[in-house]
Image: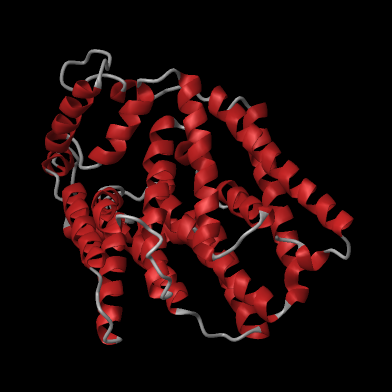
Amino acid sequence: MAGKNMTKSPKTKLQWEIILYAGAIMLAVTEFVLHRMIPFMMDDLWYSTNLVTGERLRNLADIVESQKWHFLNWGGRCITHGVLQLTLMCPEWVADLCNLAMTLLLGKLICLLAGQKGPMWFLMASSMLISLNANWKMSMFWQSGTVNYVYSSVWILVFWYVYLSKLKDTDHQSLPLIHVWIVPLGVMAGWSNENVGPVCFLLAAFTAFHLFLKKQKIPVWVMEGAVSSLAGSVLVIAAPGNFVRSALIPRGNLGETLWERFLSMLTAGADFLFPSALLLTLTLLIRLAVANGKLSIAQWVLLAGIVLSFGAMVLSPHYPDRATFGTMVLCIVLLQSIWKDLLTSNEKLMPYAAALTLLSWVNAMLIMMEGCWQNV
């Protein structure tokens, strides 16, 4: 368990774990309170209706009809918006419970990808989702944002876990029927967000290429996941609705467009993602100073995913702060993965990991308590 190197007796270890679990519970309760305080609003009100008839959603047929219209007339995120409409059909308290469950699951998946176990790492990951977030309200508590970013990050990380495990030569015999469920998972991962979805395909394609270079047999499921994630990415990007909506946006000349894209990317990197990038850079420097500076292949892939998911937004006319959520999640995964290597090489660094967890938790709690105080 996390904290084992900081304790000298079972009693002290138990006290430490009680503190960590108490911190996680406080974080979760505060998140649920915020979910209850923030009602369905803005886009939620539109998506709670049948987009064709304008009437209140009644059943799955209404959602299917809405997403057909959405795909042809507004945008390609049919998977996430379909799930969004499902949550909007529920009472708000039910949707809030689902949101909290998915947020907790996302924290657990971050630890799983990083190879970390124990309450401290879960608390660190969950806290960083708030403390490093460029817009915590719109990406984690607004219903449309929660589904588009938290929910989609869950199935994206499941996809990443399967492929990173293969790159680490982890045996997948314990994953039953993987050749069956990897197809819908790949479609969902690719058909999610325009910047992170295509990176899922690149991950799968690289895994196949890596196995080929090592002259290993490429399992059928590896190729199935690559093809299905590519299909999902094409659907989200090439949806006719994207072109219909983009035609409504006034356009300047080429010079103005390039300048706007440059400023958009600069703002995202120097503002929205700056805390994540700074913390990750410092962690990499510590790794270089006190441990073997070489990254594993899985860590290099994570770093490439961070860069590519950030850079892909240069194709978008607008880079909203909440769109950095997926990149931030990959940063947290890589950060925890590096900390695992640090502690493997030097157990005396555990107090610094604990301090980072505490600072992240305090910052997250202060951010959310301020939101509660200001009635967000």
Residue at the image position 17 percent from the left and 49 percent from the top: 235
- Residue 358 appears left or right of 41: right
Q: Position of residue 14 (x, y in %)?
A: 82, 52
- Residue 1 appears left or right of 254: right
Q: Position of residue 65 (x, y in %)?
A: 16, 26
- Residue 175 appears left or right of 338: left
User: Can you say whether 91 is above or below 27 in the image?
Assistant: above
Residue at the image position 20 percent from the left and 59 percent from the top: 230
Numbered label tally = 0
Give 252 or 237, whichever is nearer the viewer: 237
Colouring mode (rainbow / by chain / secondary structure / one colour): secondary structure
Q: Is residue 351 visible?
A: no
Q: Residue 207: which quarter of the image?
A: bottom left
Q: Residue 10: which quarter of the image?
A: bottom right
Farthest residue to the top: give it.
55
Q: Residue 376: which quarter of the image?
A: top right
Give 265 or 173, whichever is nearer the viewer: 173
Q: Position of residue 198 (x, y in %)?
A: 26, 59
Give 335 or 281, whichever is nearer the viewer: 335
User: Can you say whether 371 is above or below 313 in the image?
Assistant: above
- In which quadrant is the N terminus drawn? bottom right
Q: Is residue 291 visible?
A: yes
Q: Position of residue 58 (x, y in %)?
A: 26, 15
User: Can you say whether 17 is above or below 53 in the image?
Assistant: below
